[in-house]
Amino acid sequence: MEPSPDESSTTTIPSTEPPPPEASPPEVQPSSSPPRSPPSSSRVRAFRALLLRRLLTTAKCSDSVLLRLSRLFSTPSGTDSLLCTLGYTLTLLHSLLNHALTTRLTTLAVSIASKASEALLPGETLITTFPAPRTTQLLAHATTSSKALADLISDYRIFVRLWGFFGIYSWGRGTWTTPLPVGAGRKEKLLRAVTWGQVAACAAYQVLENGAYLASKGVLNSAGWIGEEGARRQARWWVWSCRFWAAHVGLEGVRLGTSWYYRRKLEEKGVGDGEKEEKLRREERRKENRMWWRDAVSNMAYAPLTVHWSVEEGVVSEAWVGFLGMVAGAVALKEEWRNTA
């Protein structure tokens, strides 16, 4: 488009002087700290590999634990040892939670009473209801739940002992059909007498416990098992069953003491020929010692419980019942868990 006559045109004429040199950019001084670089891909891959190894290790451990639990629950002794430990642990937990709940409610009641007493006239009584704090409600729920689950486990363990008499019969029959060897010593004769005493005590215990349990469930409902007279009869059968259990525990103490005494005498003689035989004897003694201590600890834990249940009033608190039963169950559970490996 051509310019209008009224507009002035401008023409740029090149100068004969050379253009000034361009200014060089300022030099950048190197920083004293190295520049931050983004995380490299090698670090990410290493982290992923570590995480994957952790997950695989956890999966393998979980798989091993689940398989061992399956083997543990596949045997009556394994199931009973686990339930025994869990049930008495819950009994101990209930006692501790109940104590904490009682303390908290008492503190709360005293705090409210002290504040209300300032506003009341002499002889006035304040009756009020108010929601408990959230933590107190949770503590009360946990206390009730632990007691309910412990009672359920105890009921189940008594139920599965209803047919325990068959095992006692097998025990007694095996003892009867295995006569003492000719020339048996004092140790063998004493242990055989202890065994017969334990068989008799366990048989009486089983009959009395079964009768009391079935009566408590209404299975035995004849005239002698109902009403106040029936309740007293149930209580007597429970107490006497525990007394026969206490007799079994006492005889077990005699058996353990006899085994310990004669084993010490045998070790003092040091009978053995050759290094290989001595190594086998040491391994056998180690296993016998482990089994002996297992039975001894379990028996010592059960002894106060049998005395406690052998009297109607009891002799130990609920916390001690839970603790002693937990110890006895844990000892048996440790051995059962070892057998699942």
Image (cartoon, rainbow, N blue to C red):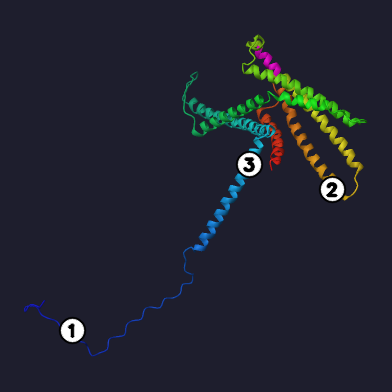
**Range shown magenta:** 230-237
Say which mark, if any, is on residue 279: 2
Say which mark, if any, is on residue 67: 3
Q: Nearer the viewer, mark 3 or mark 2?
A: 3
Q: Residue furthest left?
A: 5
Q: Height in image: 340 above or below 236?
A: below
Q: Is residue 104 left or right of residue 315?
A: left
Q: Residue furthest top?
A: 223
Between 258 and 144, the residue placed more toward the observer is 258
Q: Residue furthest right?
A: 183
The span from disc 3 to disc 2 (Cα, nearest Å) is 33 Å
Q: Amino acid at mark 2?
A: Lys
- The rendered magenta stretch, by its main secondary structure, is classed as helix
Where is residue 43? Give x, y as percent.
Answer: 52, 61
Between 182 and 218, the residue placed more toward the observer is 182
- Is residue 109 on the magenta stretch? no
Q: Are marks 3 and 2 in contact (CB under 8 Å)?
A: no
Q: Amino acid at mark 3?
A: Leu
The span from disc 3 to disc 1 (Cα, nearest Å) is 95 Å
From the image, which quarter does the N terminus lie in? bottom left
- Is residue 231 on the magenta stretch? yes
Rendered residue at 51%/28% (across/down): 114
| Picture mark count | 3
Q: Amino acid at mark 1?
A: Thr
Rendered residue at 61%/47% (across/down): 61
Between 21 and 38, the residue placed more toward the observer is 38
Name the residue tied to disc 1.
12
The span from disc 2 to disc 1 (Cα, nearest Å) is 114 Å
Where is residue 144? Give x, y as percent.
Answer: 56, 28
Where is residue 284? Give x, y as percent.
Answer: 82, 42
